[in-house]
Image (spheres, rainbow, N blue to C red):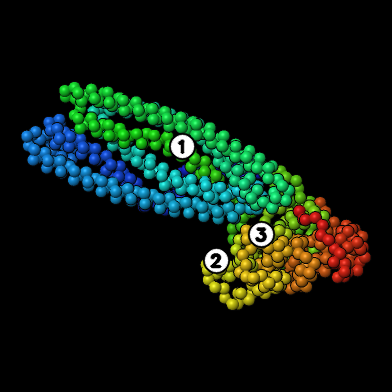
Amino acid sequence: MPSDPHGSFEDIRDGIDGDPILKAFEYAIPYWFPLLVGFVSTMVNRAARLFPALMLAAAIDLAVRPGGGVDELLAATGLIPTEPLAEEAVGDRLSLLYYLGGLTIAAYVIQSVTHFTSRYFFQTTAQRLQHDLRIDTYDHMQRLSLSFFNDHQTGGMMAILNSDVNRLEDFFNNELRQITEAVMIFGLVGAWMLYTAPELAVFVLAPVPIIAVVTAKFIIWIEPKYKRIRELVARLNTRLSNNLGGAAIVKSFDRYDVENRRVGKQSEGYRDEKIGAITVRKAFFASLRLIVGAMFVITLVVGGRSAITAGGLTAGTFVTFFLYLRELDGPMTRIGKTANNYQKAKSSAERVFGVLAHDSEVQSPDDGTEPDEIDGEVAFEDVRFSYADDGEEILHGVDLEIEAGETVGFAGTSGSGKSTLLKLPPRFYDVDEGSVSVDGTDVREYDLQALRDRIGVVEQDPYMFSGTIRENVAYGDREAFEALVDGEAVPDEVEGRIRDAAKAAGAHRFIADLPEGYDTMVGERGVKLSGGQRQRVSIARTILNDPDAIVLDEATSDVDTETETLIQENLDELTADRTAFIIAHRLSTIQDADRIVVMDEGEVIETGTHRELVAEGGAYADLWASQTGDGESEGVGEDDRDRQRPVEADD
């Protein structure tokens, strides 16, 4: 199934092998002991909760109104006398009453203790399961191929990591305990009723199979409803995420009303689907309540008649039937709620385990090559590539060889395939046909992370993490970044390397001018920095990682002329002893490159130095002339550079 651009994640559901709820239970296996304690505590709690009613029945029949009979089942335990007390034995009756009161107090103490242990172990275990599920899902999601992130929206992914995982936590926290309680109550109360008054018990318990059948029908009906609701939630989250993230665009174009209608339309769809599910759910619960009411009436009439008839139910037993029927009330209505919550949990589990079952299209091979460093020789051999199996081919048989240590500029119109081509050496994507090799080894034979550690990438629109400038630069060095994350002081030597990287990227000057310097908060996605400042911080981050090859994808597109000159002056340092790929529409950035590759419509159409390409009068010369108004083969001077203008952003 193709991916859903609205973020519903329908496409990943079919990838699950087995029942998703059972897969969720697999996460509980390491916590079997606290869960066992929780289950046992719940069962003891339910049994203790039923005990006071038996004490009340014994008090009525043996002490308050002696001669009514003895509960043989309870008497067999030795807790109460096997024979009724004489009516005139007031002292013995009072002693028995006090004794039964003491047993009841003990039952309530046991209830209190087991109530705590039951909920404590279920809730703490559910929190651990929630943590494990969220971390595993997040880690797996992070390691998926970029194509997964291209096909799925951030809002939908956030819904899985938060609301879906939280719903599974709630299922383990509440529903498992509720199911255990229901089974215990049905078992104990049903057994007592059948033993004590089988004729009445048959009347009282007869609706239970009907409830089971109706509940099964309800589960089948409600399942697709909840799938649809989860999909609509993901779509709504995606729309809200997009609009809030694009607040500046909404404001610039005054699209408040249009966006409000779009959000309103998706919110209405969610509302209507939810109302439909609520209507049927409440009708179902109301039907259960009606059945429970009928059971009360049966007990009142049939049980009361038996109590009135000589030799029938004792007064205490009659009262106990009513009390136990109230105990059955909760579990009977709870069956419907549990079925309802089960379907909600199953729908969420399908999305969570759908992500976990989704394999990355780009994976490390077993025993992949892990180089400590690379020379940086890169070769593209008859490379063909498209972003989807059925998508348009972007690269059409590209052949290109880059020598180790060479600085190569890439030029061409927007959509020519430059950025796509340079996503292949670090294996952000795999080729459809042909091969890409580094130092003579196919990139598919390298350990994935070891390869990416050696190839640094600075993107056209670099991402900034919410935090300080120091943290964003330090991200390029594992030791430095981990120290900052752990709240430790960065060693002076590491701080010096951070500042040296910032100087090499032309960022130190503007950072030093900020009131808080390197401790300046950049805001969400770096919103407090200009585009040029973000690019310089990103370059510094990459330099700090000290890669053997570096890809600069329009890395100076958003900087002013003065800053570009500063970066140009440091370009030799940026590319020293490493292979460099520089994508540029502002051709002054690459005019001093060892070689320039010109692309058009996914093919290499020209290669050569700046002077050679300008002299040839081809596509590159036309681009140069359009930017400078000058077609001469001489190098560009400062005045020319001031006149240059950038063209469209790259693909």
Q: In the rendering, at what x and y percent does residue 497 appear?
A: 64, 74
Residue at 35 percent of width and 29 percent of height: 292
Q: Is residue 220 above or below residue 18?
A: above
Q: In the rendering, at what x and y percent does residue 508 appear?
A: 69, 72
Residue type (three-letter) at the residue carrying disc 1: Asn
Q: Is residue 631 left or right of residue 6?
A: right
Query: Can residue 72 be seen by looking at this rendering?
Result: no
In this orientation, which residue lies closer to the viewer: 585 or 412? 585
Q: Is residue 310 left or right of residue 20?
A: left
Residue type (three-letter) at the residue carrying disc 3: Val
Crowd class of label 1 (few under 14; some 14 to 19; many from 20; radius 10 Å): some
Q: In the rendering, at what x and y percent does residue 80 appear?
A: 15, 39
Q: CA distance from mark 3 to mark 1?
A: 43 Å
Residue at 30 percent of width and 45 percent of height: 45
Q: Which residue is mark 1?
A: 340
Q: CA distance from mark 1 to mark 2?
A: 42 Å
Residue type (three-letter) at the residue carrying disc 2: Val
- The mark that comes first in sequence, 1 or 2, is 1
Q: How many marks?
A: 3
In this orientation, which residue lies closer to the viewer: 397 or 645? 645
In this orientation, which residue lies closer to the viewer: 401 or 488? 488
Q: CA distance from mark 2 to mark 3?
A: 21 Å
Q: Which residue is mark 2?
A: 485
Q: Which residue is mark 3?
A: 527
Q: In the rendering, at what x and y percent does residue 109 appear?
A: 25, 48
